[in-house]
Image (cartoon, grey):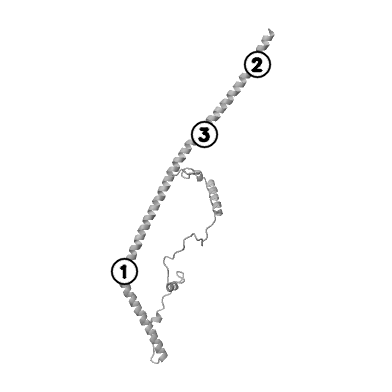
Amino acid sequence: MSSSHIDALPYYDKQLDDPARRAAAQALIEAELRQTAQVAEDDPRLPVDVDVFPKSAELADLLEGYPSQPIRGIDPSKYAPPNLNEAAGIEELKEAERRGRIGEAHMAVRLDNINLQSTYGPNAWLVRNYQLNSQLTELQATLTGLKDEVTEVNRSRRVFQEETGSHLSKLETRWQKLVGSTVQLEMACMAMEGEVRGLRRKEEELRAEVEQLEAAQ
């Protein structure tokens, strides 16, 4: 533990157990926080927001309003086969042919996507799951290590503060004893000075009596 300047031993001092002192300390902390400059949301020192799961424009359109509103499904009517009656004209037949080709192309694309997903999807899903599990295991190990470090720091801090507080208490007790001894010594010195002054007055009185007796003879 570093021997840097420490002005508080929270693991040893019990003054904050008093609600009044705790409230006063909290008020000082809040006053200091109000004076501290606040960091703006667009501060360049802050990391840039990362969209972990970006959405395509089509998916964002489908999810618009979710979850307060239900998800809008894809309109399948534009891919449905045309339904014409026998009296249909040339323009209607051309439109029906166009819609039929669109539906056929759509189904062909869907079939290709299904084939690709069947061929590569399971392996890609397993590989991605393995990567995520590996990342999760690594992050959990890092978190466990950090928790252990925090626990060790708190334990070392507690031991250091308790030892330092006990040493300070012994020094305080010794200081109080020394102060008491000094006060008692000063009081004894003052008493002796008073006795010395009394003896000196007594001496002067006796000398005066002796001189009177010698003068009377």
Q: CA distance from mark 1 to mark 3?
A: 79 Å
Residue 2: horizontal and vertical position, in percent?
Answer: 45, 44
Residue drawn at the location 33% of the way across and 72% of the way down: 117
Q: Amino acid type of disc 3?
A: Gln
Q: Secondary structure at mark 1?
A: helix
Residue drawn at the location 34% of the way across and 63% of the way down: 131
In the picture provided, is 122 more to the left or to the right than 60? left
Nearer-the-camera pick, 27 or 60: 60
Residue 14's disc is none
In the picture provided, is 136 more to the left or to the right than 48? left
Residue at image mark 1? 122
Q: Quadrant of residue 115?
A: bottom left
Residue 114: horizontal and vertical position, in percent?
Answer: 33, 75
Q: Earlier in the sequence, mark 1 or mark 3?
A: 1
**Labelled pair 3, 2 in contact (Cβ < 8 Å):** no
For the N terminus, which image quadrant?
Answer: top left
Q: Is residue 94 above or below residue 167?
A: below
Residue 155: horizontal and vertical position, in percent?
Answer: 41, 46
Residue at image mark 3? 176
Residue at image mark 2? 205
